[in-house]
Amino acid sequence: MAATALADPAVDGSTLSLIAIALVVVATGMIGAYGVRFARTTGDFLVASRSVRPAWNAAAISGEYLSAASFLGVAGLIAVHGPDALWYPVGFTAGYLALQLFVAAPLRRSGAYTVPDFAQIRWGSKRLRAMSTALVLAIAWLYLVPQLHGAGLVLREVTGLPRWVGVTAVAVVVTLNVVAGGMRSITLVQALQYWFKLVAISLPVLVVLAVNRPGVPALFDGVWADAGQGLGGTHPAAEIYSLMLATFLGTMGLPHVLVRFYTNIDGGSARATTVRVIALLGVFYLFPTIAGVLIHALLPPPTAGQADSLLLALPAATVGGLLGELLGALVAAGAIAAFLATSSGLVVAAAGVLSTDVLRGRVRDFRVAAVVAGLVPLAMALPTTSLDISRVVGMAFAVAASTFCPLLVLGIWWRGLTTAGAISGLIVGGGLSLGALVTSVAFPGVLPDALDSLLGQPAVGSVPAAFVTMIIVSLLTRSSLTPRADAVLAMLHLPAAARRSAGFDPRDRAALPGGSPIRPGSDRGPGWAPSP
Amino acid sequence: MTDRHPPRRVRVVLADRRPSPLPVLRGAEVAEQTELGRELVRGLIRAQLAASLRIAGLALAMFAPLPILFAIVPALEDLRVLGVPVAWWILGLLAYPVLYLLARLHRRQAERIERDFTELLGRG
């Protein structure tokens, strides 16, 4: 790829990195453009017409999910905090087990495009739908801002360009790609990006390992290698339990993850996809882990706030020469691929709800929505700076775990969750987690230590609070339950074959008329229309 | 507790492959939301939920004790396998195949429950 650079010995690492990054951006655009040829209807744009097979979809989901937090952040946090930081990748993976156990297949069968769609199908409430829309946008943008910050950081580290260049470049490239092809072309891009990211992290790590051959005892030396020290807070165990709760339960509430599940063929293939995703993530996370150990052993002790750029510096500092520079460029390109893939997924998800809920859901509306969905976080990212990417991303997980997780889990499995229960639970869970976040960002260190670490990791309080609120308010408003709950639950859980034998072709629901979003009762067979 | 579910019990009755008018009737029952149809679907949901909760409980039993264990048993720090502390083995490597196997186990169980239910309705 860098043939001319190889011929010139005077070329330096930043030029190589810039070339590699440019190649990734151009390739992303070209593959996206190739996919555009297949994208025509709104169904293509929003959910790739629900025709993505498990092998492709699993790679696409993993490619999209492995953000900068996984690519750079995990290695850096492990290098700084030791084995307790391993709970981040373990939690990021375990989230898919929870997703499969409680959400994947029924959610796919609901036929919804987005969480607001699901809320409307399940409860038929406009207010609940509007709240879900606002939450999808809040979580997506909360997740997008650190991605953009990370892109700015990478570009500044490897090339010296000012921060705003990277932030703006990623936001613009992603928005253009989504505007052009929607979900259809993004699927292809993201699936390829998984494999590229795997190479971009495993190759440098293995070469660093082979060149330096550090002894095992030297790698796990000192207090750093001991578990149980926490992640910098004063209550290590509590901090880790809160992180576990947020990551295990938050994944199922992330809009860019959910939107990919709607692209599965049916409920069964949604499960098959999840199993493969867990395998792909497990293989990938092996390498940031080894990288973190190597960074700790081979680089000088990092200072606070440096965690995200450590992996970028590793190859050049420990391998040296042209090989080191090339591997450094590969890591930088992988990081940019990570920003592009995750940001694309988030922009698709945000544009999906904007176009169907705020606009009228035509292809043109989706494109307008994509521009808004990409430019709002850009406006948020330019004047601000992030702490560790993984930590900010962890906050988005906490908000998702406190809102959509109880909404989906209780909504799918318990007929007794009433509209009032769902709404009050979202208010309590969203209010607590977002409130904690705003307080900890706006007034850092004002509160006593114990409270301060709770604000940084609010899930341990806000998730149970949301569940309990939904259950109690639902029990109090039991009289408002309608037979609709039974009808919808049957639709969520009946396997395709049973639906056929019950006289319904599941494809009726998959083939949506003229790109209009689902309205309950409108395309359901006789007997499924919920009672008013 | 699974043998209390109506689907399981009735399936034995239908185990002979002779065509019978009953299954068709059941499909209609489910479709038209009669009392029997509703009960059948509730049985399916209960069976699926029980399977999911079993797997979730298994995962919880394996992962939840770890942070406390690492925090209060300092002897674990000295326990090394091939020079690598056990915490690194567990969280850095073993956790992933465990999660994968749990997911596969759940997929198998969920699909079996769905097959049983579909056979109960008449057309496997």
Image: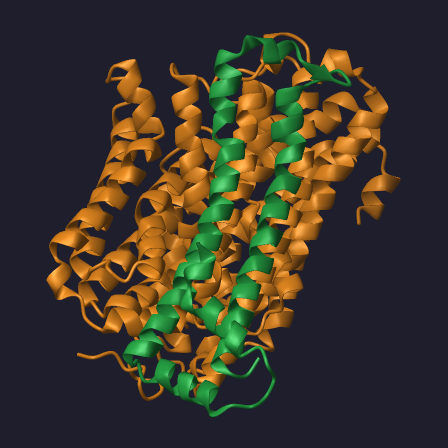
Chain colours: A orange, B green
Decide if residue A270 is in sight here. Answer: no
From the viewer's side, name the closer residue of A49 and A443.
A49
Residue shown at the point (67%, 22%) measured from the top left: A293
Counting every numbered tag in the picture gives: 0
A457 relative to A505 in the view: left or right: left
Position of the C terminus of chain B, as image quadrant, is bottom right
x then y, percent, for residue A155: 58, 38
Residue shown at the point (43%, 20%) measured from the top left: A237
From the viewer's side, name the closer residue of A458 and A101.
A101
The answer to whether residue A437 is above or below residue B117 is above
x then y, percent, for residue A13: 73, 33
x then y, percent, for residue A183: 52, 67
From the viewer's side, name the closer residue of B15 and A314.
B15
x then y, percent, for residue A181: 53, 70
Residue shown at the point (30%, 21%) measured from the top left: A452
The answer to whether residue A455 is above or below residue A100 is above
Decide if residue A214 is in sight here. Answer: yes
A475 relative to A262 in the view: left or right: left
Residue shown at the point (52%, 40%) measured from the top left: B58
The answer to whether residue A510 is above or below residue A262 is below
Position of the N terminus of chain B, as image quadrant, is bottom left
Q: What is the quadrant of residue A238 in the picture?
A: top left
